[in-house]
Image: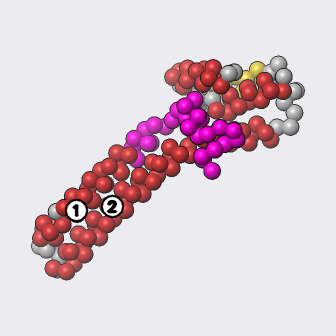
Amino acid sequence: MGKTTGNRDWTQIYAIYGIEQWQTLVFLLFHAFFFSLLSLLFLIYFDQICFFLDSFFLSGAARLAAGFTGAVTALSAVCLLFAAANFVYSDVPLQYEMAQRMVSSVGDWSCVKTALDLGCGRGILLNAVATQLKKTGSSGRVVGLDRSKRTTLSTLRTAKLEGN
């Protein structure tokens, strides 16, 4: 669902809009790396970990606890990598697709004089509305407001890239 939207590939959409919440991606990748490293340490030092856990558990339970913990950390690393890949693959393209659906749900754009987008972010919906207004030949205006100056400048840059 996130790969292609309309006539655009998801890489083209990222080239224009970028990643809005890059901190989430960094968080996921950092923790995926951390859990991968931890699971490798469990694999490399398995016997030493079992020897340490023997003082807390019965002898067979120590191996089970060490193996289970190592398996859970490895599985957590895989899940975090999958979440990071899913975030990159679908975040902005799905927002773009939703914006296209909202724009296509409006029947007559010729009577629209002003469209206001509060909290426009990077301007995905804003640019979709502006493009639709240009297609229909409307003289309407599109106004986007966001509380962040950096985001507003980014929206102006993406509008230029989109041709609006």
Q: Which residue is mark 2?
A: 74
For residue 79, above or below residue 139? below
- Residue at the image position 44 percent from the left and 42 percent from the top: 24
Residue 68 drawn in magenta: no
Count every numbered label the image shows and give the total. 2
- Residue at the image position 65 percent from the left and 25 percent from the top: 162
The kind of residue tagged 1 is Phe
Q: Is residue 111 visible?
A: yes
* Residue 127, quarter of picture: top right
User: How many other residues sit within 10 Å of disc 2, few (<14), some (14-19) or many (≥20)?
Assistant: many
- Residue at the image position 28 percent from the left and 66 percent from the top: 69
For residue 10, above or below residue 111? below
Q: Position of residue 39 (x, y in %)?
A: 27, 59
For residue 26, above or below residue 17? below
Q: Position of residue 147 (x, y in %)?
A: 56, 25
Disc on res. 140: none
Which of 76/118 is in front?
Answer: 76
The kind of residue tagged 2 is Ala
Q: Which residue is mark 1?
A: 42
* Residue 137, quarter of picture: top right
Disc 2, SS: helix
Which range is magenta? 1-28
